[in-house]
């Protein structure tokens, strides 16, 4: 259940799924999650609770938000201890002037890339796997 740690295998077997919908990042005061809100991620920080959620949901609940983005899931079960995988992906995106907000789940890594650049990001990811 621990996932793959070998960087060469991770890169060679990399495939990705682009999810529907525009996501956004938001923050709410700790312990103040609006009723009926269903973020795909929440993380407690000293300043408040960071949320990643669909833009229409944020708007419907009056939650201020930033960074409209598209979610890409990397379809390889990477170990939480894998070294260099996200760094390599982020570096390739950065070479093309694309910022990325990566989030690691237990089974997969997820990338949040700017709206309008998702197809370019998918092509870059395919290129990483092809060249590995």
Image (cartoon, rainbow, N blue to C red):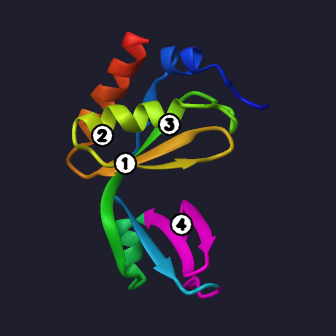
Identify the residue shown where x is 37% and y is 27%: 125
Q: Nearer the viewer, mark 1 or mark 2?
A: 2
Tell me the element at label 3. Answer: helix
Crowding near the residue tagged with mark 3, few <14, some 14–19, many ≥20 C-alpha atoms within 10 Å: some
Tell me the element at label 1. Answer: loop
Q: Residue 49 at x, y = what percent?
A: 57, 76
Q: CA distance from mark 2 to mark 4?
A: 27 Å
Q: Which mark is residue 100?
A: 1
Tell me the element at label 4. Answer: loop
Q: Residue 16 at x, y = what percent?
A: 44, 30
Q: Which mark is residue 39?
A: 4
Report the side of 70 relative to 30 (left or right): left
Depicted 81 relative to depicted 51: above or below = above
Q: Which residue is mark 2?
A: 94
Identify the residue shown where x is 66% and y is 38%: 107
- The image shows a total of numbered marks equal to 4
Q: Which residue is mark 3?
A: 86
Crowding near the residue tagged with mark 1, few <14, some 14–19, many ≥20 C-alpha atoms within 10 Å: some
Q: CA distance from mark 4 to mark 3?
A: 23 Å
Depicted 65 relative to depicted 12: above or below = below
Q: Earlier in the sequence, mark 2 or mark 4?
A: 4
Q: Nearer the viewer, mark 1 or mark 4?
A: 1
Query: Which residues lie in the magenta part?
Result: 31-53
Query: Splitting the image into 4 quarters, where does residue 35 fall?
Result: bottom right
Q: CA distance from mark 2 to mark 3?
A: 12 Å
Q: Earlier in the sequence, mark 2 or mark 3?
A: 3
Are circles 1 and 2 on residues that touch, CB within 8 Å? yes
Q: CA distance from mark 1 to mark 2?
A: 8 Å
């Amino acid at each position: 259940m621990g996932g793959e740690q070998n960087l060469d295998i991770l890169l060679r077997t990399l495939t990705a799924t682009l999810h529907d919908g525009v996501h956004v990042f938001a923050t709410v005061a700790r312990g103040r999650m609006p009723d009926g809100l269903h973020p795909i991620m929440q993380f407690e920080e000293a300043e408040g609770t960071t949320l990643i959620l669909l833009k229409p949901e944020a708007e419907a609940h009056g939650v201020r938000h930033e960074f409209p983005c598209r979610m890409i899931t990397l379809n390889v079960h990477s170990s939480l201890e894998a070294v260099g995988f996200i760094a390599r992906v982020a570096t390739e995106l950065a070479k093309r002037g694309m910022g990325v907000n990566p989030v690691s789940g237990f089974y997969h890594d997820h990338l949040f890339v700017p709206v309008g650049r998702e197809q370019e990001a998918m092509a870059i990811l395919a290129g990483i796997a092809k060249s590995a």
